[in-house]
Amino acid sequence: MSKLLSNWLENLPKAEGYQKKIRNSGYNYLKTIGLPNKSSEDWQSTDIRKLEEILSLPLNLSFESTRSFKMPSISKGSYRVILDSNIDKIHSDDLPEGISLLTQDEIINFLNSDISNQTRNNITSAINEASTNKIFALKISESNSTPIEIIIKDSIEELTTTRLLFIIENNAKLDLLEIIKSSSKSANSHLSEIYLSSHSSVNHGIIAVGSEEGSLFSRQSILQEPESSYSLSYLQEGWGISRIEPYIVQLKGHASTNLKGLQVANNEAKLSTYTFVRFNGPGGNLEQLNKAIAFDSSTSIFNGIIEVPQIAQQTKASQLSKNLLISEKAEIYTKPELRIIADDVKCTHGATVSQLEESELFYLQSRGLSLNEASSLIMKGYTKEIIDFLPVNANRWESISKYLKK
Amino acid sequence: MSNSSIQDIVSTSNSYKYGFQTNVENEKFAKGLNEEIIKLMSEKRNEPKFLLDFRLKAYKKWLQLKEPEWAKLNYPKIDYQNIVYYSAPKDIEKKKSLDEVDPEILKTFEKLGIPLSEQKRLSNVAVDAVFDSVSIATTFQDKLAKDGVIFCSISEAVKNHPDIIKSYLGTVVPINDNFFAALNSAVFSDGSFVYIPKGVDCPMELSSYFRINSAESGQFERTLIIAEEGSSVSYLEGCTAPMFDTNTLHAAVVELVALDDSSIKYSTVQNWYSGDENGVGGIYNFVTKRGQCRGKRSKISWSQVETGSAITWKYPSCVLLGEGSSGEFYSVALTNNRQKADTGTKMIHIGANTRSTIISKGISCGNSSNNYRGLVEIKKNANSSKNFSQCDSLLIGDKAEANTYPYIHSKQPKSNIEHEASTSKISEEQLFYLQSRGISNEKAVSMMVNGFCKEVFNKLPMEFASEANNLLALKLEGSVG
Amino acid sequence: MNTKPPLLEIRGLHTSINGKKILNGVDLKINEGETHAIMGRNGSGKSTLSKVIAGHPAYKLESGDICLNGESITDLEPDERSAKGIFLGFQYPIEVPGVSNIEFLRAATNARRSFIGKEELDTFEFDEFVTEQLNLIKMNTSFLERNLNEGFSGGEKKRNEILQMALLNPLISILDETDSGLDIDSLKVVSEAINKIKSRTNSIILITHYQRLLDEVVPDFVHIMNEGKIVKSGDKQIAIELEKSGFENIEMIK
């Protein structure tokens, strides 16, 4: 194990009882497996020194942002939570109908279940789990009709780690929007775990917009029971380095999953999306579209794995990775992967890397638009397909509304 | 190769047709590998010093390299000191006349459908017959020489054309390229050499036929093809081996060099012994094949039909250096029983206006696993380049595995990459339609599989297309139902 | 004393697909040389009946029997049924990518020929044979070089079905909505071809919604299907009545 990691593990804040229980798995993973190296395929395109840099930042123990940022007013009927020290003060009574806090026992029982354990054993979760004392954990029941908005902030020169757990009960529905923002030299580690019971549905949006010096390592662990429906759309923009890692398991198949991602890489940013979808039963569906635009000297990475074991007959999965490479100095890596054993399946994937369509540009220019206007118009069209998928409340945020402006 | 002879040998039985072993007296070195063995080997062949140095350098590199594990092929560790690195039918000197060649060996090739004797020769194909990594005979050399085409074994080329060998050997696949390429560079025995002079369209199909006969020898052929400016050549290779219940290592290296406006078409029908249905025996086929399009507007096209070997690990690649050059890869890989295939290509676009096309068709049956692994890379200066890839997998039976790993990397905004892949099974409606017209289940499946592969078969030379067709039908037998 | 069994006899046929019952006791007798029409609204079981006769594996035979010349065929594979002389003209002929039409036609023709003890045709003989038959459907030879039904227009697909019927020379042909999707000219070509293939020793079942095909290929018997059963049988007059009053009034016709 590297010295850096062992130091980091040693200096983690002390944890007892409940806290120890929720942190154990991450701690043990790091202790035995350690940090990734060059030959770990998921980390080949990521500068591992960046990961080390993040671990050398002090932890944001006060769980308090040192900076405030402008937030749009909350839309009527929505419930907003800012993940800071105030979450301790939230009581179930304060929550809208159909939403309640999970008890410590419920949290531990769930995290120790075989179901939940399927999503462990990876570096991004482990770092988060090992260092996060608090989980903001909610139960959503059938009577819920309130959209939830979660705000995650950064803290200068510190590593802020935040963790969510949502258990969606049978027949329940949830609109969930997460805003992850950084505005300084800082790092965020964020883990969201969502368990969807039968016949439940979640419309999940993530807006992850960071500063050029910001780092984000985030993972979405999604567990779907049959007949559930999960839809995730995300915007990843800015940052120095950022990873979004949706990890989805259809526990017994027969569920539907819809993933729509957009990453806009500027300056020197290294943006990446690693998705993994596994069908542990028959009759599952996946539709996935990931779009990327690489400007300046940025790098955009997409890696999408679809796993269809023998048991997952009649799976239908399609995945498309579309990339626009705008600048001579930018780079695109894309790797859509299919791993299939079942024979009665229909799976497709595709990837394209191209620039703005010349014929489209010419058409708009011939109608009097400048090259810049024409490009931005076409790019707007390109991003719209994803932006339109975000939960409605997302439009109140400037990061999103700027894509919608005429 | 005439159609009828190939059909005869592939369609009369449903087990591996080429599983017999020929009794010939071999001269072998002791097992194991060290500098002494390499020196002895080189001396035995009267090799020039540059080649011995090349081998020793490669050997040193090999010692530093690790056997690659990234393909996760899970085969038992190979003991490299338990392999015979030099085995040749006794009396290795190539005979002036075929009459002097061991009749057992001639009979072997005849049985394989490759008659070498004057009277029976195939009229339009020149053949280099390689038996346990030693070239036994090359037909039509004189006729080819009239056009200045050199077609001979690598060992002859080392003797007769040392300058060409010296300036090209190891320039496409460097000795330290990978573990198996380094091993091959240190110990390669024989293989084919082709040189097409400026402006010449090679008047015949050239072909090598590789036959593994000995159980304990590793097989390390080396092939080098050079197409000078404005020339063209079509080369095909076929491979078979006897059935042994041990695994034999085959680590060949193929290097192609295409200069301005030249074109090389390289086709393979690989049917090494693949082991029995329990996965016992079979060839480990760890091959490095690479072509360099050095010249402007040059073209290299790989077509392969991979049906044999216990494990195949092979990525015929194109390095597109010359402006306007193009690379193609057309592949059919069929795996059955416990076979594992990890195959695909690399298309490295370096020059401007370069083009590449990848069409890969994988068919997995039984308990086999069939991976497509391919890299498309567009480097900074490769502006206005294009790649199109299509990788389709067909699954037959619910224990077979089909994986697709395309790696795509672009640094050039004025270039386009397009990749498509699909995985599906034989459609029941199609099957019913064919069956309702009186075509049996097995025949219908085989027709549909051939239809699935048609785009690739169309790229094979005529002589091979029907062989490929029959080979697939043969390999599918028993996997349907 | 004629004890010869009917060419095709269906008795008390009940079938289901994925547990859902589709046919609820179909009885039908067809003798050599007869032309029958089966009509009925969508979902009445017409197409199912045709697929079950041809042996589609998705349908489960619950009870009943199908006999060809007095012998049960229900245990036979689709290809064995075809060899014995059962032909199904598909409502939606299947596209099979990469398989050339002529290669397919030859394989099918030879399968049937070898069953009836005729010599198989080699490529040259077959070329000659199929070129002759092409006139029947008024297509030229380029039609043969394409992939089986791939990218064919609706009319071309249906003509290809009739070509197969001509090549296989079946005892009984079930033509499932061969008229649907055909323009007037194609309908004429197709029905003329059917009339030419028709003989005293083979029989035809036409499945259709419309009278217009029946004006060209005149049926000896017309059956009306509803809810998986034949609810009425008679002569061609029924079809004409049906055209006037529509399927809503099946009960009235009854």
Image (spheres, rainbow, N blue to C red):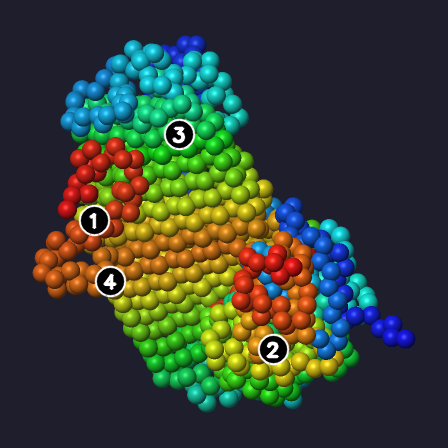
Marks 1/2: CA distance?
A: 59 Å
Mark pair 4, 1: CA separation: 25 Å
Please report the residue visible at 71 percent of the width from the left and 75 percent of the height from the top. Answer: C34
Residue placed most toward the observer, B333 or B269: B333
Of B382 and A325, the residue lying toward us:
A325
Q: Are marks 1 and 2 in contact (CB under 8 Å)?
A: no
The residue type indicated by label 3 comes to Lys
Q: Which residue is mark 2?
A: C217
Q: Is residue B424 visible?
A: yes
**Residue A352 spot, x, y in % from top left:** 33, 55
* Residue shown at the point (52%, 84%) measured from the top left: C138
Q: What whole-number distance in Å separates the C-alpha atoms at marks 3 and 1?
A: 30 Å
The lab-note entry on whether marks 1 and 2 share a chain reads no
Q: The residue tagged with tag 4: helix, strand or loop?
A: loop
Residue where numbered disc 1 is placed: A380
Mark 4 highlights which residue? B383
Q: Where residue B228 sits: x, y (%)?
A: 36, 78
Tell us which disc is closer to us: 1 or 2.
2
- First reached walking from the N terminus: tag 3 or tag 1: 3
List the residue tagged with mark 3. Answer: A173
Task: Report the disc number at residue A188.
Answer: none
Mark 2 → mark 3, Cα distance in angstroms? 59 Å
For the residue marked with disc 4, what is the amino acid?
Asn
Q: Same chain for labels 4 and 3? Say yes or no.
A: no
Vertically, is C59 above or below B464? above
Q: Residue C148 lies in what quarter of the image?
A: bottom right
* Residue reaching furthest to the front: C252
Residue neighbourhood size for the residue with mark 1, other residues' Cα within 10 Å, grouped as few (<14), some (14–19), many (≥20): some
